[in-house]
Image (spheres, rainbow, N blue to C red):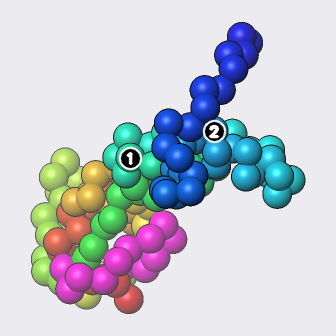
Amino acid sequence: MIMFPIPACPLPLAEYACHCPHKQQEKARMAGDDEEYVYDEASGEWMPASELAARQAAEDQVEVRDAVGNLLADGDQVTLIKDLTVKGAGQTLKQGTLIKSIRLTGDPQEIDCKYPGIKGLVLRAEFVKKR
């Protein structure tokens, strides 16, 4: 890795607070923190790489809500709010049927379920209610 000298801050420190990344890195080094700083284009700020990674991971999570508006998570139990005909299985799931241990897919409208006698059951979140 080629290291270039850090240019002097263009703002006089007496009049302005310096927000240059090299000053933030110097402050971090003085505090004993050797973490690398990266520029976040969304916020326009320099921040530690671990903090930026945590923010991006939180943004990548899909928020799935049931018919009532409750937030669903992997492993939740849900109840059907109406009768559903399962295509390809020739079976109808009745209102009030309990579905145990759901898994979230990448789609905010669909959940993956297990039900006896039906393989690969995928339900729309609008037809279930969290138990």
Which residue is label 2 attached to? 22
Viewer-proximal residue, 58 or 14?
Answer: 14
Q: Is residue 20 shown to the viewer in this render?
A: yes
**Residue at the spot 23% in from the left edge and 53% down from the top edge:** 89
Query: Is residue 93 rendered to the left or right of residue 4?
Result: left
What's the CA distance linking mark 1 and mark 2? 15 Å
**Residue at the spot 13% in from the left edge and 77% down from the top edge:** 83
Q: Quadrant of residue 110?
A: bottom left
Query: Is residue 35 rendered to the left or right of residue 60?
Result: right
- Quadrant that contains the C terminus: bottom left
Label 1 secondary element: loop
Label 2 secondary element: helix
Query: Is residue 120 rendered to the left or right of residue 13?
Result: left
Which residue is label 1 attached to? 44
Look at the image and give the residue range highlighted in magenta: 67-80
Question: Residue 88: x, y in percent?
Answer: 19, 48
- Above or below residue 60? Residue 10 is above
